[in-house]
Image (tube, rainbow, N blue to C red):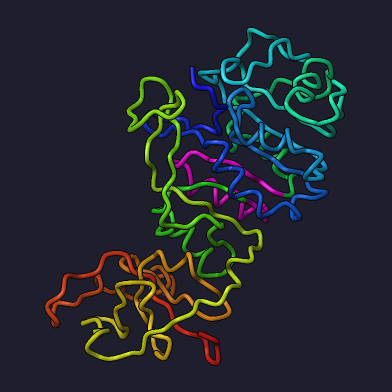
Amino acid sequence: MPNIILGSAKREKNDEFYTQLKDIEDELRHYKEQFRGKVVYCNCDDPFESNFFKYFASNFNHLGLKKLITTSYTKSPIAGMQLPLPQIIGLEPSNKAPFKIEINEVPDVNGDGAVGMGDVEWLLKHDANVASPLGGNGDFRSDECVDLLKQADIVVTNPPFSLFREYIAQLAEHNKKFIIIGNKNAITYKEVFKLIKENKLWLGYRNINSDMWLAVPEGEKYEKIVDGVKLKHIMACWFTNLDTTKRHEVFATYKKYTPDEYPAYDNYEAINVDVVADVPGDYSGVMGVPITFLDKYNPAQYEIIDINPHFFAVTEQGLPKPRQLSLHSVGKKDPYARILIKKKEGASV
């Protein structure tokens, strides 16, 4: 049995990954002040297995949370195994049906001078108001989970990657603040890119080039075992709309534009930049840059124009979609994903 508690899970075969606690701690430590006095909702998190629940429950007082809500999805495969919380008042110990946990305070009930998971376990075992069964299956799209979402100030979880489009759309519809994990490819989704372009979503603190090792359930393929946990390398990153200091840092450029080093595309009025660090600081036109540019993106410096090969902004205007960006005339392979950006007038670079 893994000796770590796992994070939220996906719900379909080959779509079930669990976040390691150290990755949660490394990211969320940057937002401590933004959690103070807030209702945090983890809506894809069975507390029996969720490291998100463990993080927020253990740090409830330290973060100054107003309330923590978690809801589980139907039939957790490892309920009661990773986080042994038997005999929870309000629930049948043998019943693995979905349920919610609402925590309004975590007193130091065991008198050890600190507040931790021992106090949380005592609370869950003795306070009938904390845990209660859900009427439905716990799907984040269900009416009862949407009602809980409406109570929340900040949503934090690792939602099902296969449902990421719906998940992010729901957060936007309800105008919620969030810190969530998603596949890097989600940047190229129409729903996600639109929010990035409109400066309503950005990347978290973790470097986009640093992929995550997520835990997988028993029976699934894995690449290595660390401390008994089967892990798989996933191209995942953090998405958020909470302010970060990172997005206000000046992206310092050192290169100068030359036509030879930065060829223009054959079919779009922009130049190609293959490496983010090589963005020419003196170029005022449109540039096609790798999507990893978002890790350096400062909205005070640059405007996001569109994305290749999807060209969502163009098609949204009812205009014909351009072909994939081409560099055939200079003997280069066509670039795949490129974000089209333009330096803002007067911006420091």
Q: Which residue is drawn at 37% across and 40% down?
A: 233
In screen coordinates, is 85 left or right of 274? Answer: right
Q: Which residue is drawn at 40% across and 32% down?
A: 231
Disc count in the image? 0
Q: Where is residue 328 in the image (x, y as percent from the top left)?
A: 14, 77
Choose top left, top right, bottom left or bottom right for residue 269.
bottom left
Q: Nearer the viewer, residue 15 or 150?
A: 15
Q: Residue at x 72, y 38 (%)?
A: 148
Q: State whether residue 15 is above or below residue 164.
A: above
Residues shaded magenta: 154-178
In screen coordinates, is 188 left or right of 199? Answer: left
Choose top left, top right, bottom left or bottom right for residue 329.
bottom left
Q: Where is residue 55 in the image (x, y as percent from the top left)?
A: 67, 36
Q: Position of residue 131 (x, y in %)?
A: 75, 22
- The single residue placed furthest to the top in the displayed view is 94
- Residue 157 included in the magenta stretch of the image: yes
Q: State whether residue 17 is above or below residue 90.
A: below
Q: Which residue is drawn at 36% across and 20% down?
A: 219
- Residue 173 included in the magenta stretch of the image: yes
Q: Position of residue 202 (x, y in %)?
A: 55, 62
